Structures are given as structure tokens and as C-alpha cells.
Image: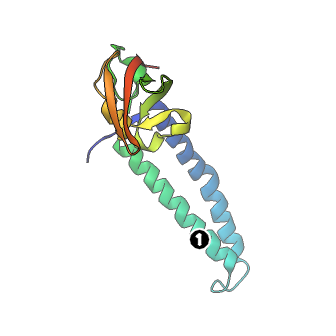
Amino acid sequence: MPRVPMTVTGEKKLREELQHLKSVVRPSISKAIAEAREHGDLRENAEYHAAREQQGFCEGRITEIERKLADAEVIDVTRIEAGGKVIFGATVTLFNLKTEENVTYQIVGEDEADVAAGKISVASPIARALMGKLEGDEVVVQAPAGDIEYEIDTVEHI
């Protein structure tokens, strides 16, 4: 099975969510199921069915997180010497040649992407266009709204 790149921060967040699900959410759902069973007939017990549904979602998410962590290749970009080349985990400041505005993105794994926080997926059009390029290079990003021309201003490993 192919390894999926993930940042140290992304791995930490998934491990924290997994721990929360196992130590807080799962026990509270088990308690809710036990309380609902005490109410008698389970066929017409809405609380019981709702708790069982929550349990299914919780167990599904636990399985999903465990699978993602098992397939993850955690990359600590701070341990890689910054040579001005865009790689996974790098924080890149781009200069839009048309609007003359700067924008900064960190290239992260697909599950970590959050454009509002400046984190873009390694599979996004911008990241694919940037990978392997150097500071000072000009790149054309093929976006749904049309081509966007950027110049790579800085590449940082933070």
C-alpha cells in the first residue's frame, strides 16, 4: 500500500483525535447505550438507536484514523536543509504577477489541507505546479478560473 505524506503537526492532530475518541467519546457512548437498555424494549427505544448510531460513527472514525496513521509517512520538514526548493511540508510565499499581491501556503497532506489557514494539499493544482521549483522561478497554475502566474518569493522549512 502506498505511503501517504503527512506533516508532524498533522500526525499529532490525528493522534489527539484518536485518543479523544477512545478515552472520552467511546466510553460516553457505551454509558448512553447502557442507560438506554435500562428503559426496556429496545425495538422502540429512540435513545438506544441514536446511541448505537453514534457508536457506529465513532468506531468508523477510529478505524479511519488508525488506517491513515498506519499508511502515513511523517515528514519533518524542519530536519531537511532548506535549499530554496519547494518540497512537501515547505512554506512557500508566492508573488501574484497580475495582482502584485503575496500569498503564503504550506504544502501539507490531503487530510491536513485548510486553505483558510494557509495549508494546501500536496495534490492541489497550486502545490503540483510548485513542487520541485526553486525560489525566483515563475510558475503558471492552471486553476478553474484560469491560469494564474506566480513568482516563488521564498521557500521556508518551518
Residue to which mark 1 is pinned: 52
Q: Residue at x 56, y 52 (%)?
A: 22
The answer to which of 74 and 41 lies nearer the viewer is 74
Q: Relative to 46, is 115 above or below?
A: above
Judged from this view, the residue extending furthest toward the left is 1
Q: Is residue 129 visible?
A: yes
Location of residue 7 (image quadrant): top left
Where residue 156 appears, as percent x and y from the top left, is 43, 18
Q: Residue at x 49, y 32 (%)?
A: 9
**Residue at left offset 39%, top offset 50%:** 67
Query: At numbered mark 1, what does the secondary structure look like: helix, strand or loop?
Result: helix
Please say if 62 is above or below 91.
below
**Residue 155: x and y, percent?**
40, 18
Coloration mode: rainbow
Q: In the displayed structure, would residue 29 be above or below residue 3?
A: below
In this view, the residue in front, 93 or 45, is 93
Is any part of residue 37 visible from this angle?
no
User: What residue do we see at 26% from left, 48% from top?
Assistant: 1
Q: Position of residue 25 (x, y in %)?
A: 62, 55
Quadrant housing residue 91: top left
